[in-house]
Amino acid sequence: MKNIFTIAWWEVTRLRSRFGGKSKFVILPVILLAMVLSYTLYHQDFTICKGLYTIGVSPQAPVIKDSRFQVLALDRESARSLLQTGNIDLYVDADKVWVRQDLRSQYAAGALKKYLENEELSRIAGQYEVNQAFPLRITIDYLDKDPDTAVAGAEKSPSLSEPGQPASPAPQSDIAANTTAVPPPQAAPKADSPVSTPSVKQQANSAPEESVLVPGKPEVQAVPKPTPSIASSSISDAAVKEQLKNLEKTRKLPEFKAEFASENDVIVPSLMSPPMPLAQVIIAFLYIIPMFFVSVFFTSSFTEEKVNRKLVILLSAPVTRLQVIFGKMLPYYVYSILAITAVTIFLKGNVMLALSIFVPVMLFIFAIYLMVALTYRTFKDQTFFSVLALSVITVYLVVPAMFTGVNNLSFISPLTLAVLMYRGETFGIAEYLVATLPCYLTFFLVMYIGNRAFNEEFLMGFKPLHTKAFEALYLAINKKHLNISIFLLGLLLIPVVFAVQLVLIVLGSSLPATALIGMIMLLSIVIEEVAKSLGIFVLLKNKVVRSRLDIIKLACLSALGFWIGEKLLLLLTMSVSAENSFMTAVMGTSMFNGWLLFIPLVLHAVSTSVVGLLASRGRKLSYFQGILAGAVIHAIYNFSILLASGVFR
Amino acid sequence: MREYLTLLKRELKSITREKTIMFAVLVQFFIASFSSVIMVGIMAFYDPSSISENTKANITVGLVGKNANEMAGFLTEKNNVHVAYYNNVTFAETDFKAGRISAILETPPEKSGVVDMKLVLPEMDTQQTVVLMALQEPLKNYENYLRMTNGVDLKYNGFNGKPANTYEFLYSIVIPILMLFPSLIAGSIMIDSVSEEFENKTFDTLMAAPVSLKQVFAAKVSAAIVTAILQVVLWAGLLRLNGLVIQNLAIVLGLATVVAAAISFIAAFVALYFKDRERAQFVYSMVLVVLVSGSAFLGSSPISLITRVASGVPNAGILTAAIYPLLLAALGFIFFKLSRKLVFSK
């Protein structure tokens, strides 16, 4: 422990000397300026498509205050000719709008329609009474199609189908009772205390009121029967007012609350907002940015000490490799934790909850950068690995979080938890695990490989990338315990394989659906075959394994590890989200019944053995041919499974 | 001139040897394809209408109640929404559970005053969203109809256009990112290229050769610009293949080149001042934050200018675009004036 602190202190001293002296008078103002500018920008009402449309307006037309529109005051005659020559995109003549048939003009009209619609809403909201301006309220109930829950649903159907009963709150409470029974809100103790911004709190208070008011009082319901419409509209009135308040707010600032319409029990069609939590994702991303900015120090420190051989000297000192790695990372960990705390306090959030979400993210990010630092060979390499790492991390964290509340697959990103936190919603321990386990796993895997590969030859070697990767893998395998190593490798590569497959889905998403599924299936087969046989290939390459029997044995072990990992992952994702046709496309089939479970295991063992045996011939393309053969076997299997399950019928 | 070409070749070689450009393209390809996913996602949820464009989800709504007929008229205005009538909710629920219909709408008898309806949606997240978003527009229309019967006068309701969100996203985010990201990479290449000379102490060797300092920097900046131009052209081509046309292509490419050159000069400044990669890259990233957020306050920042020119806004900023080369020339002039002093400063 003391060694770690010494090395950490050393790292801090190095940074201090770098940023001490004259240079801090340049660096500090630049940082300050960057912060001030981005802060003001954040608080400004800015549109990105400034002046995208040019429109003409007549004197009687409404005032258009939207920076997307360049507004010209025109009379009818000149407007007509300008519209025809394409100099303006449309013309607003009092309350009529002239457009052309081309796309540009049509888009301008669409944008204007949306803008005017919003303006009209504000106007009638101010001008008329709520009941007059927003006469339609829709109470939303949720019902499951699942046969399991259909039983629970049957109990409540009598109360739902009571003839002549207006939309009274009673069914709502039934649903509330149902939902607590059906989905998995086994809220973790930590997750149980959601952060709520003031506005979130209001909502949280009003929601229970409704469900507390009514639970299981069918007799009482009969009493206020004379005025059923008033009773129900008083509840929907409150909901409408609440949403009107939000309308005013979202026009001003990107608040935490970009609320998903279906979370309201009562919706008003014109006040329904899109469910994409863009603002919250950006806010959650605020936590990540400070880590990105210091990553350059971390990687540079490695380069520098690699180049001037300080690292090699350090390795000969009486410290372990792990101590060196942790020591160098410690200052950045401390900094990141402080940054997480500061951001949370700034946003008035729950510090403990934020830490429990973002510490795994921090471990993940610096693990990736450690990998970058270990593999690159030159400055330029470093820059591009870093940019690549940055974009991969960003995509992994941000893209799934965009679908928070839309699709439960979004829980593969920890940012989704942060989005929920800022929405004042809770999440369960299963969700927490799905989101953060990949981060922890990556961290431990990288630490392990880093520890094994942290030697002079590897650090200083200047070789092509793939050679370097094979070398790292070879170093990572414990030659004394080959069987266990290969088994674990198969198991641990699962998250990597899964991540690559997800990326494939996304990269192929512009293809038509059927071609997409086919292509993803083929590519993921190849990836799986590579993942399973990689360890064996590296061992063959270094001539550690020679006999055919050994190859087959290792292939079986690798297949076993892979199979266990695959099923664990499936189990974990199924506990969060039951609906993912893509997962089934990627993972083959999701069979859990009886001996069918073991068929994939046999398949994995056979295909990997074939790959290993073919690769052992040791010629230049042997491994490639092996992968091809293994993939063909795998593909035939997948195809026949799909055939049997009736996908093609 | 010959020295300059030799130096340029040297720089370009070092970039291609490191497969730098490959990485750069890979990174952008990655970002671009993910932004297309985000786009489809965002669009689907901002624009209910784009759901019907992107997926062919057919939605059947079970209608119950007295005013079902009237409601059906509003719902079936959309092509992918169908209706089925039920006499009571129990039957509708049976069909709902069997998956024959995707939603149940109970319409109340009254048609004036406040109308409370009940909508039953599937529990599953994704289906819920799709159904709700597909029904939003018909429900809005029905709401407007109710407003009219309530005596609320709603204006500007009588025209239609295409939903513009996708269009705005493509031209104001995707195209500017793809056109300007190569510039950021050019700046990064510049920092590496300059600071490497200091850290490996090769500047002294270079000075001993019969080349001037100006030629060295001109070669470095040109190499960075060349990589940027290659990427920008590649992107323009790929976007074209995907059916996304950049209007006024020459002006857009010129603007992207000018920005790449300007950022390269700025990066070179930073690298020359700090002389080590670590601080230079950090300060460079900070300067980028300043530049990007600062330019958002400008009337016509490079980003919004590219948006306007690329989308073909009539008479858009061709004059403004001409200001940028002038600024660049000034920047280059100052840089070459100061570079000598900076190289030899301690």
Image (cartoon, grey):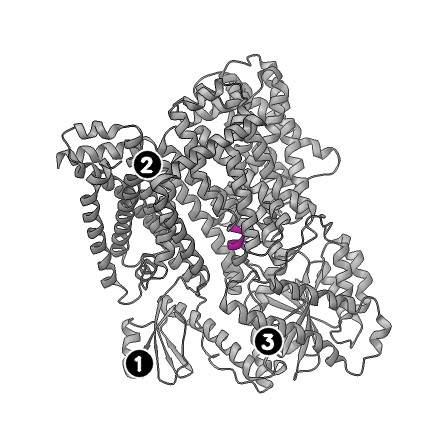
- Give me the residue at 57% from left, 12% from top: A547
Q: In terms of secondary structure, where does tag 1 sit?
A: loop
Residue that protrudes farthest toward the front in the picture: A21
- Give me the residue at 17% from left, 37% from top: B215
Q: Residues within 10 Å of mark 3 (few under 14, many from 20)?
A: few
The residue marked by circle 2 belongs to what chain?
Answer: B
The residue carrying mark 3 is B73
Q: Position of residue A114 (x, y in %)?
A: 47, 71
Q: Position of residue B92 (x, y in %)?
A: 73, 66
Residue contact between numbered discs 1 and 3, judged by CB atoms under 8 Å: no
Q: Callout 2, which amino acid?
A: Asp
Tell me the quarter of the picture where residue B214 sits.
Answer: top left
Residue that protrudes farthest toward the bottom in the picture: B151
- Give me the residue at 23% from left, 52% from top: B328
Q: Callout 1, which amino acid?
A: Leu
Q: In terms of secondary structure, where does tag 3 sit?
A: helix
C-alpha span from label 1 to label 2: 54 Å
User: Nearest the camera: A414 or A552?
Assistant: A414
User: Nearest the camera: B6 or B291?
Assistant: B291
- Give me the residue at 85% from left, 74% from top: A220
Q: Which numbered circle lies on residue B192? A: 2
